[in-house]
Image (cartoon, helix red, strand yellow):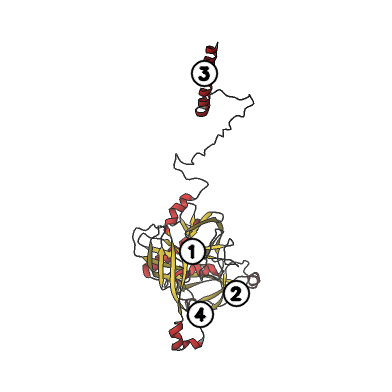
Amino acid sequence: MRRLWIIFSQTATICLAMLFVVSTLKPEWLPSRTGQGLEQPRIATVQHEAQPGAASGAPRADSYHEAVSKAAPSVVNIFTTKEVRVRRNPMLNDPLFRRFFGDDLRKATSLGSGVVVSPAGYILTNNHVVESADEIEIAFADGKKLLAKVVGSDPDTDLAVLQVEAKDLPAITFGSSDGLRVGDIVLAIGNPLGIGQTVTSGIVSALGRSGLGINTFENFIQTDAAINQGNSGGALVDARGNLVGINTAILSQTGGSIGIGLAIPATMARTVMEQILKTGTVTRGWMGVELQPVTPALAESFKLGTLQGAIINGVLTGGPADKAGAKPGDVLVAIDGKPIIDPQGVLAAVTVIAPGSSAQLKIKRKGQDMELVVVVGKRPKPQARAE
């Protein structure tokens, strides 16, 4: 009997030891204990998102990554340095004082953005970004830095073309700003506040903004994509990554973005750039007239029946319009058959006519329709502002 008890004890001990080992190392071998008052292990089944377009290579509908990847390498940071004269107490003009306090010249730095438009090293930016700069440094997206020189500038549109000594640069693809519609998606790429390349998104809020007093020639794209200090000269691109504008200014009472950003259309920027690269300057047509818009009161006074057109309220003696017979009080309604909406339309139509070419003007004088032929002159350079 004692022998049987020893065999039973040993067998039970071995079985318990085996159960302990199995439950510790291979618990899945044991039958389920559900329903026996024991808690069931918690198992979470995680679902993984299928990679959109992974098989087909198609871009994601909820991302503009493809557009940014295409355009961003072409957008550069611009750092400028210039010497400025600081006002000081006249007593410090004494040579002894100047020996200890130095002269009144200080180096001022500023920053902006630019867009590579040619693999040969040409960069498009705003004129106010590089105006009067003594040194211009370009920082590329890959970290490379090069000094640049100004090829030419056009203060009337606030555009400038720079050049660096480099080849095979990632040039941006120009899109058609003429095809933009209010509501189209746009992305602003630049270097706001010097923090590094940044992308913001928005829509085209308005087209053809003018009369803002920013540039002589205004035909701005308005967008709510965030544009801040340092974005000037950067790229405004469409949802496919094509250049549609050069970011130029914001309207703000605080100095920060409030959703009213302005960009020069790419079509205008390209025309200016090509003239600068060809001749080093921009030549525009000119008639020598002062214009004002047609108000309801003036429309009734001139018996126009419409608010479209531009009233000539001044004619430069000896200028192209004077020689053609234009007089103050004439209402300009069409140029070369194209209707004129307002004075800005006259500016846009005349400036693209080559100096020396003839243009046909349709005017109203004392209620009568008349036609004049004017030989367009060369627009004078804007006078430098007194310092």
What is the C-alpha distance between the residues marked 3 and 2? 127 Å
Q: Earlier in the sequence, mark 1 or mark 2?
A: 1
Q: Position of residue 353 (x, y in %)?
A: 45, 68
Left/right of residue 106 with respect to residue 35 in the rendered view: left
Identify residue type, mark 4.
Leu
Image quadrant where residue 154 sits: bottom left
Q: Are marks 3 and 4 in contact (CB under 8 Å)?
A: no
User: Which of 216 and 79 lies nearest the eye of the viewer?
Assistant: 79
The answer to which of 171 and 191 lies nearer the viewer is 191
At label 3, counting other C-alpha atoms closer than 10 Å, the crowd grade (few under 14, some 14-19, many 20 or more) is few
> Residue 249's x, y, as percent?
53, 66
Q: Choose top left, top right, bottom left or bottom right for residue 107.
A: bottom left
Q: Which residue is mark 2?
A: 366
Q: Which callout, 1 or 2, points to the residue nearer the camera? A: 1
Q: Identify the residue under disc 4.
A: 316
Amino acid type at image mark 3 = Gln
Q: Nearer the viewer, residue 345 or 330?
A: 345
Q: Earlier in the sequence, mark 3 or mark 4?
A: 3
* Nearest-to-viewer mark from 1 and 3: 3
Marks 4/2: CA–CA distance: 21 Å
Residue assigned mark 1 = 194
Q: Is residue 24 visible?
A: yes
The residues bearing labels 1 and 3 have C-alpha atoms spaced at a distance of 80 Å
Q: Amino acid at mark 1?
A: Gly
Q: Is residue 137 left or right of residue 308?
A: left
Q: Residue 80 or 69: which is nearer the viewer?
A: 80
Residue 298: horizontal and vertical position, in percent? 63, 72
Label 3 sits on residue: 10
Which element carries disc 4, helix, strand or loop? loop
